[in-house]
Image (spheres, grey):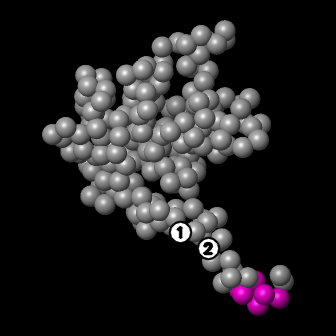
Amino acid sequence: MALSKITSICGTAVHVPGTDIDTDRIIPARYLKCVTFDDLAGKHFYDVRFDTEGNPTGHPLDDPRFAGSAILLSGANFGCGSSREHAPQSIFRSGFKAVLAESFAEIFFGNSTTLGMPCLTAAREDIEALSAAIANAPDTEVTIDLEAMTVSYRDSSVAITMPASARQALTSGRWDPIQELLDNAEETATVGSSLPYV
């Protein structure tokens, strides 16, 4: 089964402000025992979205104005801390298609890429300008173009960056290494049978 080529992401956005947002904040450790990653939908940022009694704290992710957002905005060093794959999975399973931040922790970035969820970086002032725009008009359509490497909204367009290898994997539809192995199972078996230690 060929993977889809990811060249653009369109949708509304929500801003989760802060720097050094770590994976424990993104997905609390007690959710790591889930049976499937599907169980993580809605658990993202749970302990900052709800108090100990389960009451909403007024987090931006629960603001009805930003319901259904496809793009998450944040600050520097997003996804730092432990390497738990559950962090990007919880964001992805909750409906997000891309994350735009000032910078990313390397393992979080890699885990996101293999989900087909691009992590793009932009200058702080550009993220702040986009955040202000969506605060004033939450229905603002945001378009991330992985070929032009821009994020566009209203009459604005700013540059974004990501490592060339990740960009090439996404735009060519080769972002999931497991699917790559499955798609080339016959060739893999042939190579394996020629190896003396297999």
On the picture, is 38 further left or further right than 74? right
Disc 2 element: helix
Counting from the top left corner in percent of width and height, residue 56 is at: 55, 13
Q: Which residue is mark 1?
A: 2
Instruction: Please identify the quarter of the rendering in which residue 133 is found.
Output: top left
C-alpha gap between disc 1 and disc 2: 7 Å
> Closer to the N terminus: mark 1 or mark 2?
1
Counting from the top left corner in percent of width and height, residue 30 is at: 74, 29
Instruction: Please identify the quarter of the rendering in which residue 34 is found.
Output: top right
In the rendered view, tell whether residue 154 sits above or below residue 196.
Answer: above
Residue 155 visible, this angle? yes
Q: Which residues are magenta?
A: 190-196
Name the kind of residue labelled 1 in the image. Answer: Ala
* Label 1 neighbour load within 10 Å: few <14, some 14-19, many 20+: few
Q: Tell me if label 1 and label 2 are in contact, CB under 8 Å.
A: yes
Instruction: Please identify the quarter of the rendering in which residue 52 is found.
Output: top right
Residue 83 visible, this angle? no
Q: Which residue is mark 2?
A: 183
Name the kind of residue labelled 2 in the image. Answer: Asp
Q: Nearer the viewer, residue 49 or 68?
A: 68
Disc 1 element: loop
* Label 2 neighbour load within 10 Å: few <14, some 14-19, many 20+: some
Q: Is residue 24 magenta?
A: no
Residue at 24% x, 44% y is 152
Counting from the top left corner in percent of width and height, residue 198 is at: 83, 81
On the picture, is 56 further left or further right than 142? right
Residue at 39% x, 26% y is 66
User: Looking at the image, which residue sits at the far left?
Assistant: 155
